[in-house]
Amino acid sequence: MSSRKKTMLKVIILGDSGVGKTSLMQQYVSKKFSNQYKATIGADFLTKQDVRVDDRTVTMQLWDTAGQERFQSLGVAFYRGADCCVLVYDVNNAKSFEALDSWRDEFLIQASPRDPESFPFVVLGNKIDVEESKRVISQKRALAFCQAKGNIPYFETSAKEAINVDQAFEVIARNALIQEESEEYSSDFSDPINIHLDNERGGCEC
Amino acid sequence: MAADWRSTMVKSIEMERDVREMKNYYIIDAYTKLAERAVAAETNSVRSTTGAGTNSRELARIRVELESLYNNQTTSKSTIQNLEAEAEKLKLYNARIDAEFEKLQLDKKKLESQLNTRDEEYRERNKSIQILQDEILTYQIQLNVAEDKVNKLEKENRELVNRWMERVSREAEKLNDANAFLESIDRNRQRNREANREESQREVTASAASPADHKK
């Protein structure tokens, strides 16, 4: 299976309003950062091509959501077929950290992955460039949360200063790829076209 | 208010003056009577000296009457003195009342001027209130216009957000479809590759199994 060339990985980015989801995405894809806050309406889609994951080259399709409740009504279409879910919070905002659990639940309900237990999540604690005195969520607390949720990989990032962004997305891509391959494997099993093709081939042989 | 006060004052002064004059009238009356009697007595004495002779009894009576008149005069004098003292007191009282009246007049003038000033102030204040009310009305109208605008813009914004959401939703569906399509192409390619590989393997196996056929 791993020899098959995978072209697209769908990655969903979730988190409270203003935690820096769009900024992280922009930093990763365009290496750009803007101090100006513009709320995402509905969703934004960005593509990062030619991402190297070990011996593979993949394209990452990043689906950025609106954190503001009034702009969230996309529903199942948004989550369907996701290969990895990135949960973002602001280390200087306790509420955004406390909301991670409900964002994770929301994703699991809407996307209803085949195996919710093993579905890859990655948690990003953003805005670590802000002065230490303003920080309210310690790394220890965040790590404890990630461990409790099934050893979710955790990164502390700064979209503004490009800290840990590439490293985080590398792990996101790797985990998304693993997920994608496992999905493919299971879908191959139940693919009626495959059986049909085999039969066709078999028929020709005769 | 001021007119009431003045009439009360005048009335009370007139009453006091009447009392005083009535008292003086009694004295004047007594003096007049006394003078009349004195004149009558003098006339009688002249008549008695020039007349047919003096009547001793008449003389005695006149003396008694004179005595009584003297007494009366003394009493009247003391009454006059008392009344004069009273009059003096009343004069003083009157002067005091006058002074007080003057003072009250001044106060009244002052109050009237204050009242005028106050009236003027009230008029100015009323003008200001009127101006303010006009301004409030203007602002109210502006506020209503602004509220209408806000409502209109909110509605427009809501509609735009809804349209945008629908658009994003469609975009998401399209992307999902495109992903599924690419995936199916990829899968088909892979299957074709595998099928081709299997076929070529079969061909290789078949040619290896029957080399005689090839020779033919």
Image: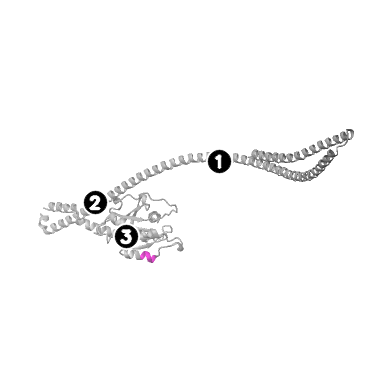
Between the residue at mark 3 and the residue at mark 2, the CA separation in whole angstroms equals: 26 Å
Mark 2 neighbour class, 10 Å CA radius: few under 14, some 14 to 19, many 20 or more: few
Quadrant of the snapshot with the N terminus of chain B: top right
Residue with the mark numbered 2:
B184
What's under tag 3, amino acid-wise? Answer: Phe
Is the stretch drawn in magenta largely helix, strand or loop?
A: helix
Residue with the mark numbered 1:
B129
Residue B144 seen in the current view: yes
Which percent across, then down, holds residue B191? 21, 54
Which mark's residue is nearer the viewer, 2 or 1? 1
In the rendered image of this protein, does residue B37 appear above or below residue A102?
Answer: above
Q: Secondary structure at mark 1?
A: helix
Residue with the mark numbered 3:
A121
Q: Secondary structure at mark 3?
A: strand
Q: Secondary structure at mark 2?
A: helix
Side of A130 where B189 appears, left or right: left
In the rendered image of this protein, does residue A96 appear above or below residue B165?
Answer: below
Specify the segment rendered in magenta: A139-143
Which mark's residue is nearer the viewer, 3 or 2? 3
Which percent across, then down, holds residue A146? 34, 64
* Residue A141 in magenta stretch: yes
The answer to whether the residue labelled 3 contacts the one labelled 2, judged by CB atoms less than 8 Å apart, is: no
* Residue B198 in magenta stretch: no
Which mark's residue is nearer the viewer, 1 or 3? 1
Side of A62 where A199 appears, left or right: left
